[in-house]
Amino acid sequence: MTSFRPLVIFWVFVLCLLGAGAATLQYLGPVAPHIAVRAKPARVQEAAPQLQPAAPAAPSVPAVPPIMAPDASLQEPAVELPDRMLPRIADTGRTPAQAYAAAFDPAEQHPRIALVIDGMGLDMALSQLVLRTLPRTIDIAYSAYAPAAVLSALDKEARQQGRECLVSIPMEPSGYPAAEEGEKSLLTGNSPELNRLNLDWVLSNMPGCVGATGGSDGMEGERFAESRQSFADLLSTLDHRGLLYLDARPGPPPPDALQPGRAMPRDVDVIVDRALSADQPAGADAIDRNLATLERLAAEHGQAIGLAGPPRPVLLERLAVWANGLAARHLVLAPLSAIAPPHPPTQDATP
């Protein structure tokens, strides 16, 4: 019996050790889960910089504010043209020429050059090149005969750029009827009522512009503009609707155009791409010479206005090169609305 006592003592000792170990593990908790809990935060901390999303890019802010969309307070129904709207002066006195003007620093002291490209919308591809390659301070004039869908697309892009627009009024040119501007032209042989209706049709084509011009698709409407009463009626209508007018004939406006109560037109100083003949459009050398003349007049008088169009590849290429060098020559492009109109003649005080 005594031979079994050491063996019993041994197993009792082993069982005591096992019991003590189990009690210790129970007190400390499971080893594997404890290690896993500590390891998980360590892995998250190391991976966090890679999983952190990049900060969102700052929203792109346009360099200049866009031109506002056509405002209902600056429109009225065209009574004789159903579903069309005409520009008008708001009840507050605000005019379309003010509301749709492009941004420009009035404190700018350098000589200013305004340039207007007419014939916009006749060729969609070239019209888009104007918007995408020329500075936004170059104004555009929409053709009266451009398709509505084309005008809408161009106008949306131009407004986002902050580029101001005009509408081109087709008027009787000096070569009429061999040269003519289409069925909606203002003609010296038309009745005043028909000319007014045609003018309403043109102005209702493109709302939200600062004004109008007689420069239409490369023509100047000289013969109609030389008809005193017809031209006076045109200026009176534009003045009544709060629109400025760009006279496409180079040189000062006629004295009767400056009578009180009529829109005082800006007058074109240089036709940038005036053709030598109907069959010989102006080339690069002629365009460059005309632009140099425009610069000289601006330097002499503090401002000058040029008219060009319709868009052609050679014209756009020369204008882009010219515009890029203006700052170095201490000149600045300005929208037409930033060019002062001519001053009315002073009245003689002597009887």
Image (spheres, grey):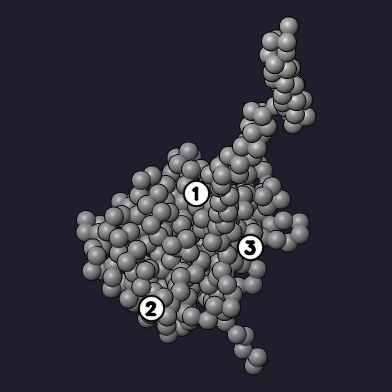
2 relative to 84, above or below: above
Question: Which three-letter amino acid code belongs to the residue tagged 2?
Answer: Ala
Q: Which residue in the rendered view is the most extreme toward the top?
A: 1
Instruction: Give the labeled residue for mark 2.
Output: 328
Q: Nearer the viewer, residue 182 or 125?
A: 125
- Given contact means CB atoms under 8 Å apart, are the residues at marks 1 and 3 in contact? no
Q: Quadrant of residue 308?
A: bottom left
First of labels 1, 3 by sequence position? 3
Q: CA distance from mark 2 to mark 1?
A: 29 Å
Instruction: Give the labeled residue for mark 1.
Output: 157
43 relative to 134, above or below: above
Q: CA distance from mark 2 to mark 3?
A: 30 Å
Q: Nearer the viewer, mark 1 or mark 3?
A: 1
Q: Nearer the viewer, residue 239 or 61?
A: 61
Residue at horizontal 54%, vertical 61%?
63
Q: Nearer the viewer, residue 249 or 89?
A: 89
Instruction: Give the labeled residue for mark 3.
Output: 98
| Residue 201 is at least partly visible in this image | no
Q: Residues within 10 Å of mark 3 (few under 14, many from 20)?
A: some
Q: CA distance from mark 1 to mark 3?
A: 20 Å
Q: Tell how many labels.
A: 3
First of labels 2, 3 by sequence position? 3
Question: Which three-letter amino acid code belongs to the residue tagged 1?
Answer: Glu
Question: Which three-letter amino acid code belongs to the residue tagged 3?
Answer: Gln
181 relative to 239, above or below: above
Residue at horizontal 35%, vertical 49%?
126
Q: Nearer the viewer, mark 2 or mark 3?
A: 2
Instruction: List x then y, in percent, for residue 283.
Output: 23, 63
Q: Nearer the viewer, mark 2 or mark 1?
A: 2
